[in-house]
Amino acid sequence: MKPWTRRLLRRWLITALFFFALIVLLGNRWVVNSTDSYIFKDAALMPDNDVGVILGTSKYLENGRPSPEFRGRIDAAVELYQSGKIKHLIVSGANPDETYNEPRAMRRELIKAGVPDTAITMDFAGFRTLDSIVRADAVFGLKQFTVITQRYHAFRAVFIGRKMGMKVVAYAARATETGGYGRLHPPREVFARVKAILDLFLLRTEPKFLGEPEHIQLAPEAADT
């Protein structure tokens, strides 16, 4: 390859990397800045909603230890339920095989913590964040609800919901064993936010599975409050 050709390719590569980095930066700024005011750390400041959607994650880390993020989401959901901020919970996640089932794992932990079974609905088709949010509206008929997940993840979830016309807020669950909220911009999430923008505005991505509508039945005492 001639020297001038190498220089030209190097310039094109540097230019392409610059614009890629710029797109990632601007995309993340859009997602975070447009949703920050809808994400809460203090349950007392949260608006009341009938339903909360817990976004699924594995109960265990790769090393086999319990996942702080899973525990944080369960604890946050229980706190909102017991304080009356939500009246019903949808546990939304993946269940690719008999050995891995996020909704069932979340349901078991919620019941152990005192949430009645009648106040829990399992969504087995929450394969991705987009699927969980879209299905909350398309399948469960929710135009307004609370997302329960870690703060770094909540930006993307709320962004998807708000851009699709839903009144979504989020409660930031703890993310670490010491009770902290964890990193604001994990590398994987940085790129996932850009993917969410592409899914919504360019690719028009649909959930992998929708199915028939399912009505959320609030318990009588919850419906009367």
Image: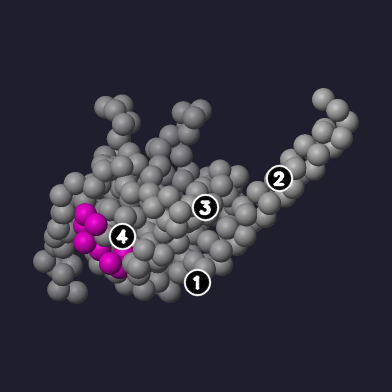
- Secondary structure at numbered mark 4: strand
Front of the two marks 3 and 2: 2
Most foreground residue, 104 or 179: 104
Q: Is residue 161 left or right of residue 98?
A: right
Q: Secondary structure at mark 3?
A: helix
Q: State the mark number for residue 52.
A: 4
Quarter of the figure that contains the N terminus: top right
75 within the magenta span? no
Q: Are marks 4 and 3 in contact (CB under 8 Å)?
A: no
- Main SS, magenta residues: loop
Between tags 4 and 3, which lies in front?
3
Q: Which residue is mark 1?
A: 37
Percent across and percent down for residue 121 are 21, 51
- Neighbor class of circle 1 (other Cα within 10 Å; few <14, some 14-19, many 20+) is few
Q: How is the image coloured?
A: one colour
> Residue placed at 49% from the left, 30% from the top?
62
Q: Which residue is mark 3?
A: 193
Could you tell me the amino acid type at mark 4?
Answer: Gly
Residue with the mark numbered 2: 17
Q: Secondary structure at mark 2?
A: helix
What is the three-letter code of the residue carrying label 2? Leu
Among the two numbered marks 1 and 4 on one chain, the one whose residue lies closer to the N terminus = 1
The disc labelled 3 sits on which kind of residue?
Arg
Measure the C-alpha gap from mark 4 to mark 2.
40 Å
**Mark 3 nearby-residue class (10 Å; few <14, some 14–19, many ≥20):** many
Residue lying furthest left: 220
